[in-house]
Image (cartoon, rainbow, N blue to C red):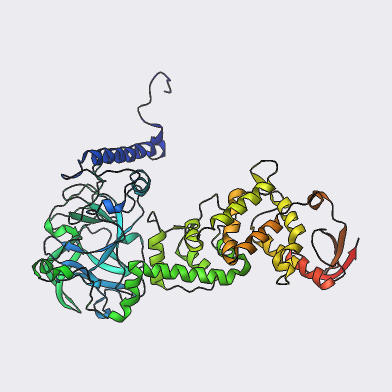
């Protein structure tokens, strides 16, 4: 049965779900597209020069993710539009009616933005092809109206009534992203998973938009639907004609199932004032859309980031953004990738005393969710909020760390680093000026290194990240450099880390048990001051203290 002379008729990956074959198919798809792009085979026009220096400005005719545009039906010449009126909503107040309107100018309700959805090819588009923001055939996307509601982004969604029914499904829009609002961009007449997929989608190209879960394409017919704006064209998720299929191999090229991404409506083509179509105007209430338009343009996201930055600095005090780093679970995790979902990111921001509206959170995720999986990398978000340390400060931080690594090991024992900080704490500028006590300085430093213990080490990346977090809290460069130098000034002897403590206190607990605790010599504290000793012990986790006795 297991004759080694007989070669295997299958790959090793077949036992784990054909993983090997799937990876090879994905690699072949990338290589095929790169080859086609170099030769210009993806289009009849000039070839796309895909190099490391490629910028979106050089690809002006492609569809760019995250940019506002219209989705115009080939059959009717009308653009998909949103109606937020509650009396026409399928399931108010969170779902809204979607129709198609043939208007001479783009409106807020007929302007949509394509977002990334979770797609296995996103990494290849971003890293290998350098086209992370360009829409490609076969890519999964979410279609959002960012401006119609102040409560958040409204996503196109298939209203699945019966999972076993292969006919018509209602098309609605709903607040909040989920698995039921993912669509696949497909060439007319081709399968959605065809290996030839992967070419960049051009503005004005007719495409089919298949609902990923049910494989039903978007459809716009000339049937009329009553809306708060009058009668408009009806849209749904269904195949034109009598053909119905849920097979992933099903194709469509019927005009009712095709849409022009970034196209102009029939009325706009006839209008003499179509040159002004770039100015978005809405027939709906303009008061609620003011903040929405700002958020969609990107200016609002910058304002939200600035508000988070100010709140984190106020909350962090002398520790700057270290408090935010701890809230986002990035402190001492610089070498890892920490991902956060919406609830986790919102919780961390709320801890800084900053409130966020649902629309603002949607806009933040649009900017930082690079793969479309509903997660943001906490390190990238923190870097955007905090910024980088000035070069002269960064050079001083690296030099200080190099003085600590006298053995050239590339890391420092956390225990020795903490002992040195305690030894030098009385000489810190804030301590000398009476802003804080030496004990408070040590306490703040210890709390800035979550998860560190006596056996842990500190790398250069962690050391730099710590000072990059606290740097914005100090405006004066001279004061920052003086604090840094005094913190890590190494004494002539290493008694600060090797000598045994000569002071001890005996703690009598409420359950009449006794415990002897060593007080480091580097900790500046009068052990005869019972209140001060009690405060330090409580800060370091000692509980149920009944009485304290000092011994030498």
The quadrant holding residue 548 is bottom right
Give the number of callouts.
Answer: 0
Question: In the current view of this chain or complex, which residue is farthest to the front?
Answer: 478
> Residue sitting at 32 percent across and 43 percent down?
51
The front one of 307 and 369 is 307
Tell which of 302 and 18 is nearer to you.
Answer: 302
Q: Residue furthest top?
A: 5
Rendering quarter of residue 373: bottom left
Q: Which corner quadrant holds the N terminus?
A: top left
Q: Quadrant of residue 87?
A: bottom left
Q: Is residue 474 left or right of residue 89?
A: right
Side of 252 relative to 11 (left or right): left
Compare residues 502 and 243 and report the one nearer the observer: 502
What's the residue at 38%, 22% (across, down)? 7
Query: Which residue is at a point 24% across and 66% down the rendered structure image?
Result: 171
In this orientation, which residue lies closer to the viewer: 509 or 75?
Answer: 75
- Residue 475, position as x, y percentages in the image: 58, 67
Q: Position of residue 121 (x, y in %)?
A: 34, 47
**Residue shown at 66% from the left, 54% from the top:** 452
Q: Is residue 159 visible?
A: no
Give the quarter of the figure containing the C terminus: bottom right
Q: Position of residue 387 (x, y in %)?
A: 50, 60
Residue furthest to the right in view is 552
Horizontal relation, residue 342 to residue 288: left or right: right
Place of residue 241 in the rendered image (x, y in percent of width and height, measured from the top left): 11, 57
> Taking 95 as reference, is 408 above or below it?
above
């Amino acid at each position: 049965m297991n004759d080694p002379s007989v070669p295997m008729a299958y790959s090793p990956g077949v036992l784990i779900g054909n993983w090997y074959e799937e990876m090879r198919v994905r690699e072949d798809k990338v290589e095929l597209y790169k080859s086609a792009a170099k030769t210009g085979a993806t289009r009849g026009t000039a070839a796309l020069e895909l190099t490391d220096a490629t910028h979106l400005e050089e690809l002006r005719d492609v569809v760019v993710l995250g940019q506002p545009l219209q989705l115009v039906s080939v059959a009717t010449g009308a653009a998909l539009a949103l109606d937020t009126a509650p009396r026409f909503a399928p399931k108010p107040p969170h779902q809204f009616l979607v129709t198609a309107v043939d208007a001479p100018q783009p409106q807020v309700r007929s302007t949509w933005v394509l977002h990334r959805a979770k797609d296995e090819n996103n990494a290849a588009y971003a890293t290998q092809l350098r086209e992370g923001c360009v829409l490609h055939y076969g890519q999964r996307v979410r279609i959002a109206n960012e401006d119609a509601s102040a409560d958040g982004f409204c996503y196109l969604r298939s209203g699945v009534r019966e999972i076993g029914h292969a006919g018509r499904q209602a098309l609605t829009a709903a607040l909040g992203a989920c698995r039921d609002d993912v669509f696949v961009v497909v060439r007319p007449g081709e399968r959605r998973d065809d290996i030839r997929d992967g070419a960049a989608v051009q503005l004005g190209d007719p495409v089919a938009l298949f609902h990923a879960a049910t494989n039903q394409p978007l459809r716009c017919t000339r049937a009329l639907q009553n809306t708060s704006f009058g009668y408009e064209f009806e849209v749904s998720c269904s195949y034109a004609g009598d053909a119905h299929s849920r097979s992933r191999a099903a194709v469509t090229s019927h005009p009712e199932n095709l849409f022009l991404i970034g196209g102009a409506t029939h009325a706009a083509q006839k209008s003499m004032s179509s040159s002004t179509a770039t100015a978005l105007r809405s027939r709906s209430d303009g008061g609620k859309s003011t903040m929405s338009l700002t958020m969609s343009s990107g200016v609002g996201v910058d304002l939200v980031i600035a508000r988070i930055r100010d709140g984190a600095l106020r909350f962090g005090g002398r520790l700057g953004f270290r408090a935010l780093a701890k809230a986002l679970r990035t402190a001492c995790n610089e070498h890892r990738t920490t991902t956060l979902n919406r609830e986790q990111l919102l919780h961390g921001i709320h801890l800084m005393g900053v409130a966020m509206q649902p629309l603002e959170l949607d806009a933040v995720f649009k900017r930082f969710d690079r793969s479309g999986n509903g997660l943001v990398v906490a390190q990238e978000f923190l870097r955007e909020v905090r910024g980088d340390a000035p070069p002269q400060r960064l050079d001083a931080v690296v030099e200080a760390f190099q003085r600590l690594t006298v053995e050239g090991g590339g890391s420092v024992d956390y225990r020795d680093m903490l002992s040195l900080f305690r030894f030098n704490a009385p000489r810190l500028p804030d301590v000398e000026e009476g802003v804080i006590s030496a004990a408070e300085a040590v306490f703040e430093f210890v709390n800035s290194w979550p998860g560190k213990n006596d056996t842990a080490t500190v790398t250069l990346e962690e050391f730099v990240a710590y000072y990059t977090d606290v740097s914005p809290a100090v405006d004066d460069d001279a004061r920052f450099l003086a604090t840094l130098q005094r913190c890590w000034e190494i004494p002539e002897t290493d008694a600060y880390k090797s000598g045994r403590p000569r002071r001890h206190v005996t703690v009598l607990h409420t359950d009449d048990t006794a415990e002897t605790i060593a007080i480091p010599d580097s900790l500046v504290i009068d052990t005869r001051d019972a209140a001060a000793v009690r405060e330090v012990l409580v800060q370091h986790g000692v509980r149920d203290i009944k009485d304290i006795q000092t011994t030498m």
